[in-house]
Image: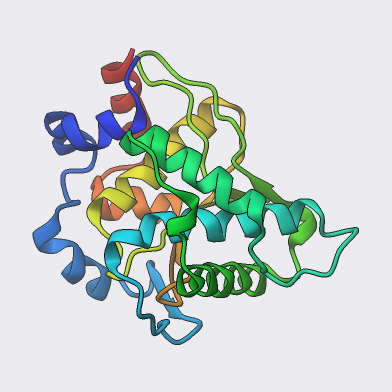
């Protein structure tokens, strides 16, 4: 079975078949030339931080854990975005699983916690009004050689992936959200919008599934899905 990361990073030949118009050199131009179909929003100022970039992923995981816990407990507690010990431990465990090795929880500084709390609070603000509809990490059963995946968030018919980078959205981010959409379809989920959200930069990109396929695959969504099905079986 292929993990999502393997498919995104290693199967470049297939991506050139699936989404031939999605590449690093032309992505920025595509976003500008299709601004009516691909809506980019700056919903908050970029965060100012003193923490080294090497801790971005750990801070992002702590922020996501705080956000997810708050959404889960939305009916019983005030939503503040505050990071607790449980959020830190879970983030460290996940980073160890992804990268190998161990991280000393004592290495988590006050500045890192402040960043994580701010990002968690921003996510709560971003999803304000739809807390009851937010699904965190829903399991999408695998298809063919593609293993099961867990997108960050699904809200009604929107599939949303959260990023914590200090930089703009990358080609790999678009591939990831599209791969999740492919599995969502095969899990009977009615998804019609794809969205990328970065609480650190206060940015988001949203597009319809049909527009995504026409812009990056140059064909209908059903034909693009058929290509993935044939190649991943």
The answer to whether any part of residue 83 appears in the image is yes
For residue 226, above or below residue 19: above
Q: Position of residue 127 (x, y in %)?
A: 66, 67
For the C terminus, give its image quadrant: top left
The picture places residue 190, in percent across and down from the top left corner, at: 61, 40
- Closer to the camera, 114 or 22? 114
Asked if residue 162 lies left or right of residue 24, the reply is right
- The percent coordinates of residue 217 (x first, y second) are 25, 45
Task: Residue at 45%, 38% (x, y): give it.
Answer: 180
Give residue 19's quadrant in the image.
top left
For the N terminus, the quadrant is: top left
Which of the 4 image quadrants contains residue 25? bottom left
Relative vertical location of residue 6 with respect to residue 31 in this rendering, above or below: above
Residue 2 vertical position relative to residue 84 in the rendered view, above or below: above
**Which residue is at 48% across, 24% downward?**
148
Q: Give the residue at the far right of this rendering.
A: 76
| Left or right: where 25 falls relative to 103 | left
Q: Furthest-front residue in view?
A: 106
Residue 44 versus residue 61: which sits nearer the camera?
A: 61
Q: Nearer the viewer, residue 179 or 111?
A: 111
**Image spot of residue 106 (x, y percent):** 48, 56
Reply above or below: 184 against 1: below
- Camera sees residue 162: no
Residue at position x 36%, y 43% in the image: 176
């Amino acid at each position: 079975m292929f993990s999502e990361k393997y498919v995104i990073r290693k199967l470049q030949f297939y991506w050139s078949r699936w989404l031939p118009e999605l590449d690093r050199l032309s992505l920025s131009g595509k976003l500008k030339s299709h601004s009516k179909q691909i809506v980019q929003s700056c919903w908050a100022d970029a965060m100012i931080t003193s923490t080294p970039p090497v801790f971005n992923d750990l801070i992002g995981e702590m922020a996501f854990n705080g956000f997810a816990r708050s959404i889960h407990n939305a009916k019983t507690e005030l939503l503040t975005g505050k990071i607790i010990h449980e959020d830190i431990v879970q983030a460290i465990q996940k980073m160890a699983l992804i990268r190998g090795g161990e991280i000393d929880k004592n290495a988590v500084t006050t500045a890192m916690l402040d960043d994580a709390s701010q990002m968690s609070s921003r996510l709560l603000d971003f999803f304000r009004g739809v807390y009851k509809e937010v699904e965190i990490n829903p399991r999408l059963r695998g298809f063919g050689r593609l293993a099961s995946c867990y997108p960050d968030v699904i809200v009604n018919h929107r599939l949303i992936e959260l990023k914590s980078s200090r930089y703009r959205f990358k080609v790999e981010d678009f591939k990831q959200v599209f791969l999740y959409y492919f599995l969502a379809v095969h899990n009977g989920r009615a998804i019609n919008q794809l969205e990328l959200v970065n609480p650190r930069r206060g940015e988001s990109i949203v597009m319809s599934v049909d527009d995504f396929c026409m812009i990056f695959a140059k064909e209908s969504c059903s034909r693009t899905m058929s290509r993935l099905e044939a190649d991943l079986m």
